[in-house]
Image (cartoon, grey):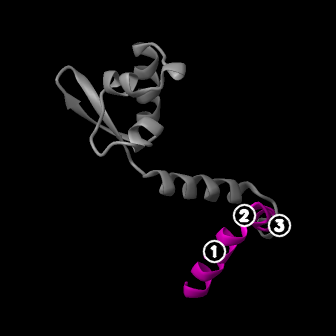
Amino acid sequence: MDVLWTTDMPLTPGGVQERLPEERRVEYTTVMTVLARLWKKGRLTRERDGRAYAYRPVLNRSEHAARRMEEILETAGDRSTALARFTEQLSASERKKLRAFLEHE
């Protein structure tokens, strides 16, 4: 997903593979499999690009993080406690931004 989030254009499996950092480089077929699974889960869209598909994320990085947080909160027994624990991990400036956002909501 990181590779797809860093570009504005859809990428084929080959395009994703060549943009992977050397230490995370995997086989082309592995990239194809992962992209196909993410598409089936609804996390990517795809369009034909010659003989291959080109993929792009449905959500940007921030939207994806927010969705994951929502999913976690849905499974938390006590949402208030979970949110309190989360905010304890924020820096002072992040808490200030969160407070300002909540006041303007």
Circle number at residue 90: 2
> Which of the two labelled residues, at mark 1 and mark 2, occupies the earlier sequence position?
2
> Which of the two labelled residues, at mark 3 and mark 2, occupies the earlier sequence position?
3
Residue 82 pos. (x, y %): 79, 62
Please, which residue is most extreme toward the bottom here?
Answer: 103
Distance from the alpha carbon under mark 3 to that under mark 2: 15 Å
Residue 56 pos. (x, y %): 34, 41
Looking at this view, is 9 or 34 the one in front?
9
Task: Name the residue rendered at 45%, 13% in the picture.
Answer: 27
Q: Residue 29: which quarter of the image?
A: top left
Crowd around label 3: few <14 · some 14–19 · many ≥20 (10 Å) = few
Q: Quadrant of the C terminus?
A: bottom right
Q: Are the two marked residues, 3 and 1, in contact with CB atoms closer than 8 angstroms? A: no
Please, is residue 5 above or below residue 32 in the view? below
Q: Residue 88: which quarter of the image?
A: bottom right
Task: Name the residue rendered at 56%, 53% in the picture.
Answer: 65
- Tell me the kind of residue under disc 3: Thr
Q: Are the two marked residues, 1 and 2, in contact with CB atoms closer than 8 angstroms? A: yes
Q: Which residue is mark 3?
A: 81
Residue 21 pos. (x, y %): 48, 25
Please, is residue 18 above or below residue 40 in the view? above
- Tell me the kind of residue under disc 1: Leu
The region drawn magenta spans 82-105
| Residue 82 appears anywhere in the view | yes
- Tell me the kind of residue under disc 2: Leu
Distance from the alpha carbon under mark 1 to that under mark 2: 9 Å
Q: Residue 47: which quarter of the image?
A: top left
